[in-house]
Image (spheres, coloured by chain):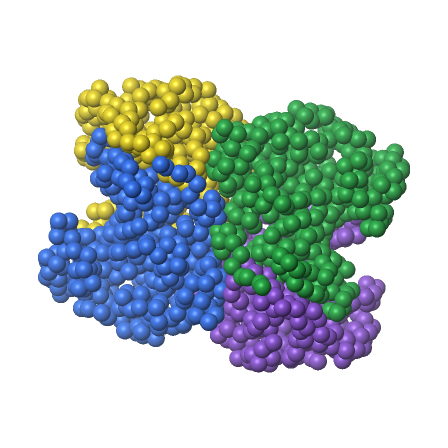
Chain colours: A blue, B yellow, C green, D purple
Amino acid sequence: MSLNSFGHLFRVTTWGESHGPALGATLDGCPPGVPVEAAALQHWLDRRKPGQSRFVTQRKEPDAVEILSGVFDGQSTGTPIQLMIRNTDQRSKDYGDIVEKFRPGHADITYWQKYGIRDYRGGGRSSARETAARVAAGGVARAALGVLTPEVEIIGYMVQVGPHGIARARFDRDEIGRNPFWSPDAQAAETWGDYLDGLRKAGDSVGAVVEVTARNVPAGLGAPVYGKLDTDLAAAMMSINAVKAVEIGEGMAAATLTGSQNADEIFMGPQGPVYASNHAGGILGGISTGQDIVVRFAVKPTSSILTPRQTITRSGEEVQIITRGRHDPCVGIRAVPVAEAMMACVLLDHVLLHRGQVGGNRGRIG
Amino acid sequence: MSLNSFGHLFRVTTWGESHGPALGATLDGCPPGVPVEAAALQHWLDRRKPGQSRFVTQRKEPDAVEILSGVFDGQSTGTPIQLMIRNTDQRSKDYGDIVEKFRPGHADITYWQKYGIRDYRGGGRSSARETAARVAAGGVARAALGVLTPEVEIIGYMVQVGPHGIARARFDRDEIGRNPFWSPDAQAAETWGDYLDGLRKAGDSVGAVVEVTARNVPAGLGAPVYGKLDTDLAAAMMSINAVKAVEIGEGMAAATLTGSQNADEIFMGPQGPVYASNHAGGILGGISTGQDIVVRFAVKPTSSILTPRQTITRSGEEVQIITRGRHDPCVGIRAVPVAEAMMACVLLDHVLLHRGQVGGNRGRIG
Amino acid sequence: MSLNSFGHLFRVTTWGESHGPALGATLDGCPPGVPVEAAALQHWLDRRKPGQSRFVTQRKEPDAVEILSGVFDGQSTGTPIQLMIRNTDQRSKDYGDIVEKFRPGHADITYWQKYGIRDYRGGGRSSARETAARVAAGGVARAALGVLTPEVEIIGYMVQVGPHGIARARFDRDEIGRNPFWSPDAQAAETWGDYLDGLRKAGDSVGAVVEVTARNVPAGLGAPVYGKLDTDLAAAMMSINAVKAVEIGEGMAAATLTGSQNADEIFMGPQGPVYASNHAGGILGGISTGQDIVVRFAVKPTSSILTPRQTITRSGEEVQIITRGRHDPCVGIRAVPVAEAMMACVLLDHVLLHRGQVGGNRGRIG
Amino acid sequence: MSLNSFGHLFRVTTWGESHGPALGATLDGCPPGVPVEAAALQHWLDRRKPGQSRFVTQRKEPDAVEILSGVFDGQSTGTPIQLMIRNTDQRSKDYGDIVEKFRPGHADITYWQKYGIRDYRGGGRSSARETAARVAAGGVARAALGVLTPEVEIIGYMVQVGPHGIARARFDRDEIGRNPFWSPDAQAAETWGDYLDGLRKAGDSVGAVVEVTARNVPAGLGAPVYGKLDTDLAAAMMSINAVKAVEIGEGMAAATLTGSQNADEIFMGPQGPVYASNHAGGILGGISTGQDIVVRFAVKPTSSILTPRQTITRSGEEVQIITRGRHDPCVGIRAVPVAEAMMACVLLDHVLLHRGQVGGNRGRIG
């Protein structure tokens, strides 16, 4: 029972502080025979890397991943894979103000109250830098899925920044990689650009909504009742820094639907069941149906803004605080590759769990 | 690693099918010396019981809980507590239609595909009847919290039925127990009554949004990064039948807030930190702040409606299906006591985890 | 993380006190499609039942097992299986002496110190009665192994009672079921009979050594480094009441062997590797080789004897204690069916784990 | 559920292959505020280091440990602590013979069969080098115990080499650190020296028995039934390379004792219960009594000897094999620091578990 680990058979433990010597991930349970190489993992990390546009934090980290174990002759051995990322750019002087002060909206105060000690540099363990380790782990998970379920595709993108959502009718998958926002809607990308420029100059920030879809996932994944696929996905996304809500399929909107509107009717196709719609988001009773798995989550705005805020110090003194240094007008942007990584890890875990528990789908239809 | 269990130190395993001999919960890790008696647990179960109003399923189950172990002279011993509820009203003839057919929106098809065998009576293990076991477990958790953190209060209520939400300005805690909907807004309760009467007559159903608040929770609960309090709460609520989204604090709305709007500023009060607002929902960095913990989730409408739906049979034949028998126009109503039970279980778990990991809050302020 | 559970994918939680209403086992992860029936489980329980000869405790319990969930149409569904055994013969007046006194060699004092409350009747949760639940669980595990690895055989037997060991040269498998001691050596059975008659009359008891062998176990089972097959077997056997040592293969004797004596040389047979000897007990590096898995453990003598012993009371008063009532001259005898049950549970767990983690052996030889 | 992790609240995951870039341990759950420094951990590693006498392997590894996370200002933060040890001396040409051949008595064949890929250099993950990570973890555990239970002492020593045991009457604690064998009996150390010199020259090896004692352990540690202290200790020691048996207290000898001989009578002392003897090895019903916890285990002889042995290759060809290069005449010697480390980790885990589950001993005596 590690509280710094997630997963059942494919179990990932992350470690490391924002300004410590390094951070990384211990992967236990990657099946053997999966091609694993640092360059492939680096690709995924580079997509997440700070400093890619003026809209994300300007911390220059190479985020170079090193594989320390579990791989031999370019393949996983079935033994633990240790991934390490050294920290290099640790401009700690930016954080001098927070040795004594608790930044509102951050974990500073709760970490202090709970542990009685906190690495205040860059938020320590509570920093979003921890997600770099997740993305590295996600790279390995993707490689394993590539062997076990090669048809599975995982696509993450932004659907809303502040009050501005995309238009689903303009959804273009190829657009996602062409703008700094992972937006599938070119028009929305432009709107967001102007909007965030304004916020950045004002020293403010805003929240966002990220969506990640998994396609061609086989039916049968998920372990009811408490290892349901949607339960594990909800936990995975909720564990990402700054996330305040998770939705599956219709999400909150399901509350407004009637039964006659919501149920996805079933027909028979040449290769098995075919669904007329996907309000369920690809999961029924906690088990995948074979339809697209659609997960969405809301990221709150970063509280590290340039407006002075009221707070207290460790000695109980009321003060103001301005967090200088590097800031994200919209931390949600960086969460897109993280969402994909978590989806990959959870799916791999459930592929292994399914074959362990049941040995493969047992029920024929047709 | 039980996929039918949740919790870390206070670990609950539920078992049982809708129409099997019994269902129940195995509770492992209840601290010793907690007063546990069947009558107290029965109180919580009766609040959930079917047949209480014309708006919830008319299945007549006494839901009588029996304590089979772990209690001696009216107190928990620290050994596993087995709670059992015998099933008595199992009108299986209501379900004759679904031996071969898969009800759209239900887990019938996925359970069949995965396991190759399913107890089709009443949905078997996928039935919401499983939540009776959770409510019984929640009764024990409440008793333990009553010893360890007696000031904690857990209150669940409905905030939306279909498109109709409550007015927060009319929130009256005492109203919750006075209407059949757990509504804190008397006016909304009337609106919902008329709305659901119409749906029930039409043989349709609708979704809902449930909110559960925990008050006077000590700061410091939660085990980052993957045992965060909000992560465990999200998983707990998402695991409830028919839930499609979970929110903490502002939830999805956090996406639209700016940093200057969202951060809860901190002041110093006579007994410690005081927050000017609670956009965070009582949790920062995955650890409780001492503020109200606010969790919300959306329940989709039941798919067991009287309108004929398209589906297929096990042999792949396309047919129509009408699910006769007992139906809920709004299953979300029954989820309110379940939400409270899950909140109690997760909080107790984290109280124990916190004292085990850290021994109690270590950081002084002031 | 349940401390009252064992296993990874096939996870068993036992519950129940010696004199409580019932005891049982919650089985999570039995694969679907396994034939499970109460009569078959009853067979295994009857082999363990008290009252079978003058050498085991005279408590008359029918030990009737009831299946409460997880089985439909005679087959496991993949959902949790709840097995319950009602307690009927609870001659509590036999234990009146120990409300205040701690029986030396028993868990009375440690349970009191730790929990501050203990069900003193019959030892409560610390009673060997708990092993009835294990045997029931073992019955299900055997049924599952019968489907997945039908060639596997599990045979338990006694190899030593007090100072008297069997002669390996006289080992006769058919003899095991013909005497009250599970002895594979008829001559030893006679010696033990006389020896234990003497002890029983003297009101004393003695320890024993149990051995359990698993034959035709496929190679490849075991999950290094901390889920090694021998690690899980050691834990399984050590968790049985009164066990003080566990051996694999040569066991303690391995310390006296030289490298040239100990290594099992390997040859090639028609169907794969063949070993010239089995000092390893069927496990290398924590993984099964395909040879017989041989596990042995020592059971200490019961401390419930008729000789007065020095002890103290809860109030710290020094007193003498005689435990009257039902007594075993050799509790080790009852441990034989328990050892078989634990072997079955651990093997099933590893069969599932192996196929989940790796999907089946991947390395060809020849 | 990591199969490369052990522990419940203090959870250690080891990673790394013998000849990979590095090996290490991820420690999750070290309580905050524990002084942790690399120099202190190095002390424990140096005691284990290869190359210290002619009786242990001559591989020259500095085994320099680096702390990569979880420590701030010299104290643990409560976040995961990553310990890394770079491999430097990897004379891989010594192992050229085993690319194709399986060394008898080693895990080569089972790893190949299970995973279909193995890092054959130095035994890969199955190498005893993995124990360096355990010793580093043990160093942190000792530091934590030093804060939480400073009176606890952990002492490991050798009690038997081949057929030669120590004389308990000559037991001298100070002798342990004065000879190359961790022998508490100076005379036995001399006997062992001559004996092992002979074996080393003959290119052979022999097994050994290690004993580790924990003194001043508070009563109440251990979580029945499957998290018993002796169960966790048995698993911990059995997981060490080459271990074939584990004993608690009397161990296998308990089988020969009668009840009147074995029970440890209880008297009342000034500070609580006092036991007349310690056949139990400090554990009753899986819970510590406060007496010395005595654990013993047998290490088999290394199979890497200079005598030619029969084996097969991956292609099924029968061949002979001689393992050249570095060899231990008695690998058991190196296991002594490992046993201490495991004892420390398990004890710390149970200290945390106890305070989490129960909050401290609840039952008064006197």
Left or right: D81 in relation to B99: right
- In-front residue for pair B63/D316: D316
Q: Position of residue B10 (x, y in %)?
A: 49, 42
Q: In which quarter of the view is residue D215 placed?
A: bottom right
Q: Quadrant of the C terminus of chain B?
A: bottom left
Question: Farthest residue toward the front?
Answer: C270
Observer able to see residue A71: yes
Residue located 46% across and 23% down the image:
B87
Observer able to see residue B34: no
Q: Position of residue A365 (x, y in %)?
A: 37, 37
In this rendering, is residue D356 above or below A364? below
- In-front residue for pair A80/D99: D99
Q: Position of residue B273 (x, y in %)?
A: 32, 52
Q: Position of residue A341 (x, y in %)?
A: 33, 58
Left or right: C180 in relation to D67: right
Q: In which quarter of the view is residue D348 placed?
A: bottom right
Residue located 33% across and 34% down the image:
B316
Left or right: A300 in relation to D316: left
In this rendering, is residue B32 above or below D243? above
In this rendering, is residue A228 above or below A80? above
Residue located 48% across and 66% down the image:
A70
Residue located 36% across and 44% down the image:
A219
